[in-house]
Amino acid sequence: MIRKSVYWPFVLSAAVAFSAWAAPAYIAAAENAHVTKPVDAAPTTDALLALEKQAHEAYIRGDGKFFENLLSDKWVAQQGGIRRSKADAVKGISGVRCEVGPGWALSEPRMLKIDKDAYVLSYESNLRGSCTENGKTEKLPDRARAATVWVRNGDRWQAVFHGENPIIDPSAPPSSDKKAEPGADAHTATDTNTGASAHNVTADPITGALMAAENAVSDAWRRHDAKTINELTANDIAFVDIYGTFTANKPATVKAWTSTLCNVSSFTLTNGVGTSVSPTVGIVTVTGSYVGTCGGQDISGQKIAENSVYVKVGGVWKWVFAFNSPM
C-alpha cells in the first residue's frame, strides 16, 4: 500500500515521484498569447499547465536557475520528513539529470481557487524514464498525481508548494513496506511547541492556529463526521491522498473522507510548521501518525507527510487543500 513519494526538488527515493518546473512568470504565457493580463486577473488552467510543462523540461536538464524566479521565498517542501527551503530546492535541482522518453504529457488539469491571489493546479503525469542524482539512478513512476500551489507576486505567479504521488491501487499488495524508524523524523521547527530539529526552520506565528485547525479537521475525518468537515472547510476544496487519488471538489472530498476506506482509532500530529503565504493564506506541514487501517491494510506506525493549505474566511482559518504522502 505505502510507496515512497517525494517533492520534485529532491527527486530520488524508493519508488520515486518526479516533477519539475520552469519559467519565471505566468505573465510570459500571456505575452505569448499576445494578451495583456491585468495584474489582478486570475490565471488560466492552460497558462499554468504550460508553465508546469516548461518546468519539467528545465528539471530534466537540471537547470536550477529556472527555479530561482519561479519559486516564492515562502516556498514549502518536505522530503523524508525534512522541511526544505527555496535555496535547498534550487541546489537540489541543479544536481539532477534525467532521461525521459518522447511522448510524455501532463493531463487532466484541475484548478482550485483558494482566493484571488492563490490557486492550486493539479494534474497527472505519465513520464517514463529515470533520473540520476549524486550517482544514484531511479526509475520514474508511469503515472503520478501532482499538485502545485501558486501565489500572486506582483505581475507574476510563483510556486509555494509542489508534490507528486505515484497513482496506486489502495487495495493492491505493497511492493515495499518501509516503516518510518523511531527518531528518524527531522521535520520540525524552531518553535518551542513543535520540537527540536535536525534541519532548523522557523515557524510563523500562525503555526498554533493552523495546528489547532488541522487537529480539528483530522479528528472530523477520523470520525467520518460530514457535518463538522463541512463546517471546518472552505466552500470549495480539493485533496490528494497517499495513493495519488485526487478529489476535485467539496462533495467528492467529503464523500471520500466519510467512506470506509480508512478506519482510524487514534492519531497524532507533530512537528507542525506554519507559513504565512499571504495575510489570508497559510500552509502548515506536519507529521501524521495513525492507528488503524486504510484500504484494508494496517497503517499503524506509518508516518504521513501532510501539507495543508488554509484560507482565512471571516477571520477563521478554513481548510481548503492538502497533499499527503507516505514517509
Image: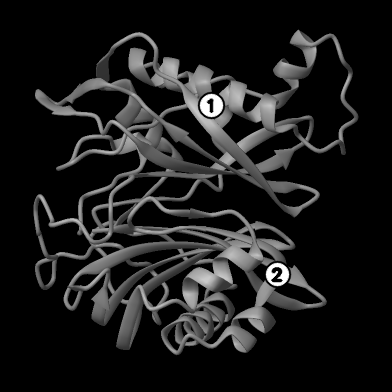
Identified at 67% across, 24% down, the residue is 25
Identified at 54% across, 72% down, the residue is 255
Badge 1 is on which residue? Answer: 52
Quarter of the image for residue 278 reads: bottom right
- Kind of residue sitting beneath label 1: Glu
Q: Where is residue 45 shown, x and y percent of the image?
A: 69, 33
Quarter of the image for residue 146 reads: top left
Q: Where is residue 111 shown, x and y percent of the image?
A: 66, 43
Q: Secondary structure at mark 2?
A: strand
Q: Quadrant of the N terminus?
A: bottom left
Tell me: 235 left or right of 226. Answer: right
Depicted 302 relative to depicted 323: above or below? below
Q: In front: 11, or 67?
A: 11
Q: Where is residue 172 shown, x and y percent of the image?
A: 19, 56
Tell me: 120 left or right of 327. Answer: right
Identified at 9% across, 59% down, the residue is 177
Depicted 67 relative to depicted 244: above or below? above
- Kind of residue sitting beneath label 2: Ala
Label annotation for residue 234: 2
Q: Is residue 320 visible?
A: no
As measured in the structure, the alpha-carbon distance from the residue carrying label 2 to the one carrying label 1 is 26 Å
Q: Name the N-terminal-most of marks 2 and 1.
A: 1
